[in-house]
Structures are given as structure tokens and as C-alpha cells.
């Protein structure tokens, strides 16, 4: 499976168990520091789950701000 995301200049390809992401150094820059990838059914549901876990882990001292993208 291969597809492009032209809005951000990425090409993605699945090769067996691998996901390849191809682009210029500048376009790949945000991805180079990633420590984990999550595969989820719904971004909204995962966001709610993650916000709840952050709040519980911090004892309510930290208000999670996960952005609005």
C-alpha cells in the first residue's frame, strides 16, 4: 500500500510490517524525534482517554493541553 499526503509533502508506503515515510529533510524533521506511535480507531476518543490519564497521574495538578490539531 502506498499513498501521498501532498499537503505536507510526505509519501507513505507499507512494506510488510514496516511503514516507510519519505520526504525532504525539512518535511521529516517533526517525525525524527518521535518516541512512540499509536494506532487508534478515533482521535477524539483517544484524546479524551489520554487527557483523563494525565489528570489522574498528576493528581489533578496538571491540566493537559494536547493542542487542537
Image (tube, rainbow, N blue to C red):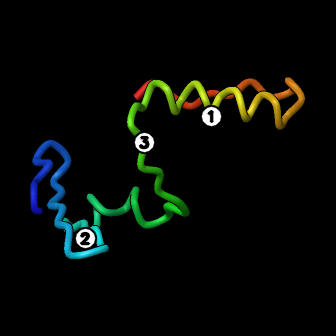
Q: Which residue is mark 3?
A: 40
- Which comes sooner in the sequence, label 1 or label 3? 3
Tag 2 and tag 1, C-beta contact below 8 Å: no
Rendered location of residue 31, percent (x, y): 40, 60
Q: In the drawing, does residue 51 fall left or right of residue 61?
A: left
Q: Is residue 42 above or below residue 32?
A: above
| Mark 3 burial class by Cα count in 10 Å: few <14, some 14-19, many 20+ | few
Give the image quarter of residue 10.
bottom left
| Quarter of the N terminus within the rendering | bottom left
Q: CA distance from mark 3 to mark 2?
A: 19 Å
Residue 54 location, x and y as percent? 73, 34
| Residue visible at 20% across and 67% down in the picture | 14
For marks 2 and 1 on the same chain, the one whose residue lies earlier in the sequence: 2
x, y (%) of residue 51?
Answer: 65, 28
Regarding mark 1 in the picture, which secondary structure is present there?
Answer: helix
What label sits on residue 14 in the rendered view? none
Name the spot of residue 66 as percent of width and height, x first. Answer: 57, 31
Marks 1/3: CA–CA distance: 12 Å
Residue position marked by numbered label 2 in the rendering: 20
Q: Is residue 5 left or right of residue 44?
A: left
Q: Say which of marks 1 and 3 sits in front.
A: 3
Q: Nearer the viewer, mark 3 or mark 2?
A: 3
Residue bearing the label numbered 1: 50
Left or right of 35 in this view: 10: left
Q: Is residue 9 left or right of residue 58?
A: left
Amino acid at each position: 500500500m502506498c499513498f501521498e499526503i501532498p499537503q505536507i509533502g510526505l509519501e507513505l508506503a507499507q512494506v510488510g510490517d514496516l511503514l516507510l515515510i519519505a520526504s525532504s529533510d525539512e518535511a521529516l524533521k517533526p517525525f525524527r524525534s518521535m518516541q512512540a506511535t499509536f494506532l487508534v480507531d478515533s482521535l477524539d476518543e483517544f484524546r479524551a482517554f489520554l487527557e483523563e490519564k494525565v489528570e489522574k497521574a498528576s493528581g489533578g495538578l496538571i491540566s493537559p493541553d494536547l493542542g487542537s490539531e
